[in-house]
Amino acid sequence: MVVAAGYETKVLGELEKEPEPGSLELKVFPAGALVFIDGKPITLPMGGVVEVLEGEHVLSIAMEGFVPVEQRFTIAAHKLFRHRVELRERETGQDPYLKGFPGGEPVVAKRPTNPYKVGGWTAIGVGAASFVTGGVVHGLAFLDAQDAEGIPNLPGRRDEFERKRDDAKTKEITAYALYGVGAALVTTGLVLLLVDPNDSNDDSDDSDDTQVVPTAMGRGGAGLFVTGRF
């Protein structure tokens, strides 16, 4: 624009409105996929709600072993938009990459390790080993008790009898402690598996899939019998 001396110049301008923020509540299954909005990677917080400026945007999601997804969505100012994406398993021959973002480079997310399943099965495995060890120690306590009963009640054998009896009691207490630790670990493992937030079937009723049944183990012991699928 040129302004000349002695002339009046009028300028008409219109300011562009700055876009206002809205919110996107995004739930992606399975958890751990790479998520991009307009080609920029984002990290979903615990609740899955992120702030996004009003207007139309492109959502891109990719994960190893699953069919990548690219979708458009619109955010309104000061409004919450809820969206759920469940990735499908990739069939043989399908391209595992989501191309064209960011920077035109292929993108693929590695399948993450599920800490709930790893922790759950580890706890159950260690708990089962604790049960087995407790059973072995309980058996040794029973043998010591039998040995003690077989010692004649003679003055010269009294110390031997008391030693065997004390050994049997110590091993029995140790066995029950191992049973308790095993029960606690197995219960913790089951809880981790059953409350896994990464389970994509959160809308289905799995009450018939898993059953936890108390069971007696003999000689005052108890345990849990588990059937089902996870």
Image: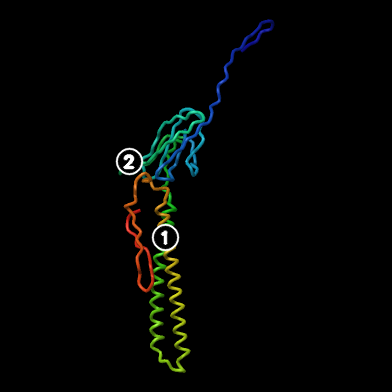
In x, y percent, where is residue 132? 38, 70
Which residue corresponds to mark 2?
94
Q: Quadrant of residue 182?
A: bottom left
Q: Quadrant of residue 188?
A: bottom left
Residue nearest the observer in this picture, 26 or 14: 26
In x, y percent, where is residue 95? 35, 40
Q: Indicate the amino acid at tag 2.
A: Gln
- Look at 31% across and 43% down and name the residue there: 91
How is this picture coloured? rainbow
How many C-alpha atoms fall within 10 Å of the one at disc 1: few (<14), some, or many (≥20)?
Answer: some
Query: How many numbered discs, if any?
Result: 2
Pointers 1 and 2 in contact (CB under 8 A)?
no
How many C-alpha atoms fall within 10 Å of the one at disc 2: few (<14), some, or many (≥20)?
Answer: few
Q: Is residue 169 above or below residue 211?
A: below
Specify which label sits upstream in the sequence, 1 or 2: 2
Q: Is residue 153 above or below residue 92?
A: below
Residue nearest the observer in this picture, 75 or 207: 207
Q: Is residue 189 above or below residue 51?
A: below
Which residue corresponds to mark 1?
187
| Callout 2 secondary element | loop
Quarter placement of the N terminus: top right
Q: Is residue 39 left or right of residue 229?
A: right
Q: Indicate the amino acid at tag 1.
A: Thr
Q: Is residue 185 above or below residue 172?
A: above
The residue sitting at the front extreme is: 220
In x, y percent, where is residue 159? 48, 89
| Callout 1 secondary element | helix
Residue 20's disc is none
The residue sitting at the top extreme is: 6
Name the mark nearer the viewer: 1 or 2: 1
